[in-house]
């Protein structure tokens, strides 16, 4: 009850200043990202984003399609920032902008939610989202992670109609996991594409799906891009 203050009060005040500083940086980052998105739209090229649970193979597929050499690791948070590259397919008009994003995790700590959602906000503006799933895991784990991904996309107000489900690592399953995967109602609903980003299996089919879906999305929108509401 004296005239001084406790050391913890000084600590709390310093933490509040630091939190305000970080929030300001996040807001500036969001503004810069919006400007980058607007500039990409001027190119008139479809924007495709990779999304999915951590360690599902997003960066491996990104490297395959872009001839990049980004670090791919099973560890959490190997990818922390969004990377975007132009990809040219054999089709004369087959050009897309492909973006690699941070992996989803369930039960994300509260203090990381805003930071990650700021990074993942670009998913809202994508013409197509490739939702990666590790098909080599146990079916219960696949269901849990897939539902977690859907919940995260819903929280980001992403249109699930823009999602193309990509079942990765099917080279680790017998017969590519064809009968195993086709028999599960969870996958039937999304008409998934089976690939192996490591071996290159199914990439031609995936490219065809990307071209078809992005072309259809542009025709429906009637404009180079439409910002999600």
Image (cartoon, helix red, strand yellow):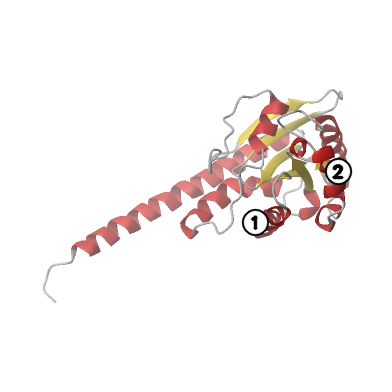
Quadrant assignment, res 127: top right
Quadrant in which the C terminus is drawn: bottom right
Q: Is residue 113 left or right of residue 41?
A: left
The residue carrying pointer 2 sits among few (fewer than 14), some (14 to 19) or many (20 or more) residues within 10 Å by Cα, namely few
Q: Which residue is located at x 68 percent, y 23 percent?
A: 67
Whether residue 152 is visible: yes
What residue is shown at x 77% (from left), y 39% (from top)? Answer: 170
* Numbered badge on residue 115: none
Asked if the residue under mark 1 is in contact with the one under mark 2, i.e. CB atoms within 8 Å, the reply is no
Residue that label 1 marks: 152
Q: Secondary structure at mark 1?
A: helix
Q: Residue at x 77, y 43 (%)?
A: 166
Name the spot of residue 13 as percent of width and height, x first. Answer: 28, 60
| Label 2 vs 1, first from the N-terminus | 1
Please indicate whether residue 7 sits to the left or right of residue 49 in the image: left
**Front residue of this view, candidates 26 and 141:** 141
Spot the residue most to the left. 2
Residue sitting at x 84%, y 22%: 90
Task: For mark 2, give the secondary structure.
Answer: helix
Q: Residue furthest front?
A: 174
The residue identified by callout 2 is 178
Foreground pick, 225 / 10: 10
Q: Is residue 55 above or below residue 149?
A: above
Q: Give the image location of residue 44, x and y in percent.
A: 77, 34
Label 1, residues with CA under 10 Å away: few <14, some 14-19, many ≥20: some
Q: Position of residue 193 (x, y in %)?
A: 82, 41
Please state which of residues 187 and 207 is positioned toward the viewer in this rendering: 187
Q: Nearer the viewer, residue 93 or 147?
A: 147
Q: Quadrant of the N terminus?
A: bottom left
Q: CA distance from mark 2 to mark 1?
A: 28 Å
């Amino acid at each position: 009850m004296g005239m001084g203050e406790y050391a913890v009060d000084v600590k709390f005040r310093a933490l509040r200043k630091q939190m305000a500083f970080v929030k300001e940086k996040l807001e500036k980052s969001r503004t810069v990202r919006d400007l980058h998105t607007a500039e990409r739209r001027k190119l008139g090229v479809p924007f495709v984003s990779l999304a999915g649970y951590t360690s599902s193979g997003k960066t491996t597929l990104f490297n395959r399609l872009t001839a990049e050499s980004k670090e791919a690791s099973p560890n959490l948070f190997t990818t922390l920032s969004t990377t975007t590259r132009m990809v040219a397919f054999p089709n004369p008009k087959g050009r897309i902008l492909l973006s690699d994003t941070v992996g989803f995790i369930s039960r994300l700590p509260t203090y990381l939610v805003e930071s990650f959602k700021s990074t993942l906000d670009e998913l809202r503006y994508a013409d197509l989202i490739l939702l990666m799933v590790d098909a080599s895991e146990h079916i219960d784990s696949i269901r849990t992670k897939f539902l977690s991904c859907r919940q995260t996309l819903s929280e980001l107000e992403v249109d699930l109609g823009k999602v193309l489900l990509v079942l990765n690592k099917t080279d680790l399953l017998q017969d590519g996991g064809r009968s195993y995967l086709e028999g599960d109602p969870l996958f039937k609903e999304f008409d998934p594409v089976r690939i192996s980003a490591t071996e290159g299996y199914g990439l031609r089919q995936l490219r065809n799906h990307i071209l078809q879906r992005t072309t259809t999305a542009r025709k429906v929108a009637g404009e180079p891009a439409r910002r999600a509401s």
